[in-house]
Image (cartoon, rainbow, N blue to C red):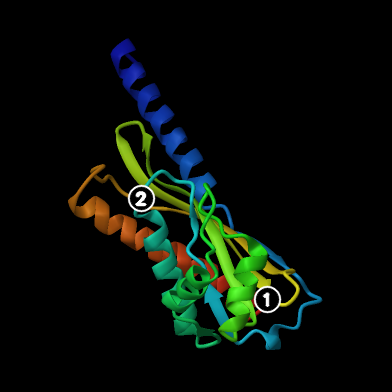
Amino acid sequence: MKASAAVRWATRLSAAFALMVLLAGCAAGPRLFVNHEADMTLYKRVVIVPFVNLSGEPYAVGRVVRAFTTELILVDRFQIVDPSLLMGELERANVGPDATGQFEINKLRDAAAKLGATAVIRGSVSEYAMRRVGTDEYPVIAFDCEMLDVQTGIVIWRLSIQQTGKGRLPVVGGSGERTYSRVTQEACERAVKLLRAKIL
């Protein structure tokens, strides 16, 4: 094998290995904690709080929360409280998010209780970006969420998930944005499917 051909082969092998590492990491199964002492039948009416954005992408939280809410509605297990009602209760109580975007949990529980909710779902988006492998770029989305009992504040379940897109895509505009949407939906589908299989 000539030197130039060997270099090209080694380069392709290295890129393929890097891609395998990326996909293996992104395809890792979601992590789920379930509090088996909690009575799941008590949680019918649920409030979903705006997630905290740790990703640096300003639209990440809105996209993830909308997709996650849609998947929960499709399961037809919960009655989801209109988010504007929760925000109204928090505003009337003069409660706002802190510097990280989180609401003080006791104030959040009080507002949820006034709306007749028995549980609160909150979370954070930790990654919403393109990852480069060689000359290719892939959208990667990761988020965590948990459901808390309104009366006690105990964690009912906690979930962490990461999802990656496939194929070569531009960083901005056009198909890249549509692929972000698709990967977001897939991540939320996986999350709710796991919840449904284990506890819903």
Mark-to-mark CA distance, 2 and 1: 29 Å
Q: What crowding class fits label 1: few (fewer than 14 Cα within 10 Å), some (14-19), or many (20 or more)?
A: many
Q: Position of residue 172 (x, y in %)?
A: 23, 45
Q: How many marks?
A: 2
Q: Position of residue 197 (x, y in %)?
A: 62, 77
Q: From the image, which quarter does the N terminus lie in? A: top left
73 is higher (above) or lower (below) than 68: below
Q: Position of residue 69 (x, y in %)?
A: 45, 74
Along the line of sight, the residue nearer the viewer: 148 or 109: 109
- Quadrant in which residue 34 is drawn: bottom right
17 is higher (above) or lower (below) than 76: above
Number of the label disc, if any, that sits on residue 1: none
- At 40% across and 69% down in the image, what residue appears? 67
Q: What crowding class fits label 2: few (fewer than 14 Cα within 10 Å), some (14-19), or many (20 or more)?
A: few
From the image, tell me which residue sits under label 2. Answer: 58
Instruction: Give the number of the mark in front: 2 or 1.
Output: 1
From the image, tell me which residue sits under label 1. Answer: 150
What element does badge 2 sit on? loop
- Quadrant in which residue 19 is drawn: top left
Along the line of sight, the residue nearer the viewer: 72 or 167: 72
What element does badge 1 sit on? loop
Q: From the image, which quarter does the C terminus lie in? A: bottom right
Q: Is residue 152 left or right of residue 96?
A: right
- At 37% across and 24% down in the image, what residue appears? 11
Q: Is residue 21 left or right of residue 8?
A: right
- At 39% across and 54% down in the image, what residue appears? 60
Name the N-terminal-most of marks 2 and 1.
Answer: 2
Along the line of sight, the residue nearer the viewer: 7 or 42: 42
33 is higher (above) or lower (below) than 82: above
User: Which residue type carries mark 2?
Assistant: Pro
Q: Is residue 113 left or right of residue 132?
A: right
Q: Is residue 55 left or right of residue 134?
A: right
